[in-house]
Image (cartoon, grey):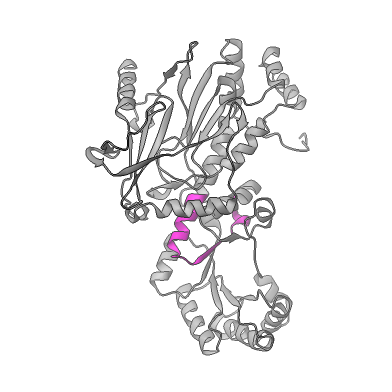
Amino acid sequence: MKTVEKLNMTMLCDFYELTMGNGYFETGYQNRITYFDVFFRDVPDKGGFAICAGLDQLIDYIQNLHFSEEDIAYLRGRNMFSEGFLDYLRNFKFTGDIWAAPEGTPIFPREPIVTVRAPAIQAQIIETFTLLTVNHQSLIATKANRICRAAKGRTVLEFGSRRAQGADGAITGARAAYIGGCSGTACTISDQLYGVPAGGTMAHAWVQMFDSQLEAFKTYCRIYPDNATLLVDTYNTLKSGVPDAIRAFNEVLKPLGITKCGIRLDSGDIAYLTREARKMLDEAGWTECKISASNALDEYIIQDLLQQGACVDMFGVGERMITARSEPVFGGVYKLAAVEDEAGHVVPKIKVSENVGKITNPHFKKTYRIFDNATGKAEADYIAVYDEVVDESQPLELFDPEATWKRKTYTNFTAKPLQVQVFKGGELVYQQPTLQEIQTYCREQVDALWDEVKRFENPHNYYVDLSQKLWDIKQNLLREKK
């Protein structure tokens, strides 16, 4: 196997992107302007909404697009590509336009998350990585948001690196989990690269390393007096774990005047054990001691634990978050929506299927989020043709996507574009927010949704409707393709 010093992510594309690119070049279509939409069809876990993430990595990818001489030599060796096309790749760079929903935005099925306007070969080659980064991080951010909402304001940390699907799954997964609402991660490199706060205390091996559990606890308290969280379930949580932790706190922390400390449980009946541990800590005077819990948690287990009176201040969530174990595929797709003719007119394109859910919405589009001026809540999304403007002084009627006979009219509203322009003519025109700003934005936007949309079970159908103009265009195309 040939080793490569640094992977060129331009080559992280499905091979048919290159065969199509060569075909476009040979038929003179390489400069034809195309419009592609990234969207998804179903919310993971049958939820009411998803969270968009991954844009920052897409930006970095677009800015570094290139084919090296080594890449071109590899492609030449496949004996499938013309020398003209290989020469074209030698000078390859992205020159198109991209619009995207900002990271942290709640998103809904069938609406454009990312829109790419670019020459055909460019738009085709970036398909795989665009889907990869948006699908993966949106999946993890969505799962993390569900888990954090289940925790009802309690701290949630991402603990899943060792169970992630590869190194990048751990690194960018921790980033996405932070966007979704986690307070930090166990993944050190995610802190180094992205500023996701990393932290941790001890494993069972620390306790086992010493001759006694008490010695292990006291030693740790002496080394880290300001961050003493002790793992109390290595042997017996209530008979020795919590009592030894209290003794270590009394003998090491109390003389220093330190009252901030914690214990963690990673096994057993979390609801029962944390209730009993809380009583023991409070009776010993350690009322400020925080209790953390981990061990294969997800939103449903956390919800149940809190309903059962578990005394938990912080949850560490691993494999079920970092792999989105309950539904580990986001399902975003990248579909052609329009092309430009020689005169520069936008010509809508549609994909037709016997599966109604796979019929695409054609044209270069603009999506508006409708906010009720009286409540500030997000009420619906309105997908229009790119040159349509929503008149906020006129009533706006939308249909329920799941039951088109249902309709709702909005009269006192504000319509805000869902997407922002990220690239223009191949140049970055978007001011990238910090990761902390993205997390804050995500929290604010989720708060703007009605609680009925945020239910875990049978959430309310959020309206996502097409403008009359776009609806008519779609119906005309469907009639043409019969």
- Closer to the camera, 155 or 441? 441
Q: Is residue 384 left or right of residue 98?
A: left
375 w.r.t. 223: above or below: above
Q: Is residue 102 left or right of residue 90?
A: left
Residue in the picture at 54% in, 50% down: 438
Q: Which residues are magenta?
A: 141-165
Residue 160: within the magenta? yes
Q: Quadrant of the N terminus?
A: top right
At which x and y percent is residue 393?
A: 29, 37
Residue 426 in view (yes/no): yes
At which x and y percent is residue 407?
A: 23, 39
Q: How many marks?
A: 0
Residue in the picture at 38% in, 31% down: 358
The answer to which quarter of the image holds residue 182 is bottom right
Residue 232: within the magenta? no
At which x and y percent is residue 250?
A: 64, 88
- Closer to the camera, 209 or 102? 102
At which x and y percent is residue 386?
A: 42, 27
Q: Is residue 70 left or right of residue 57?
A: right
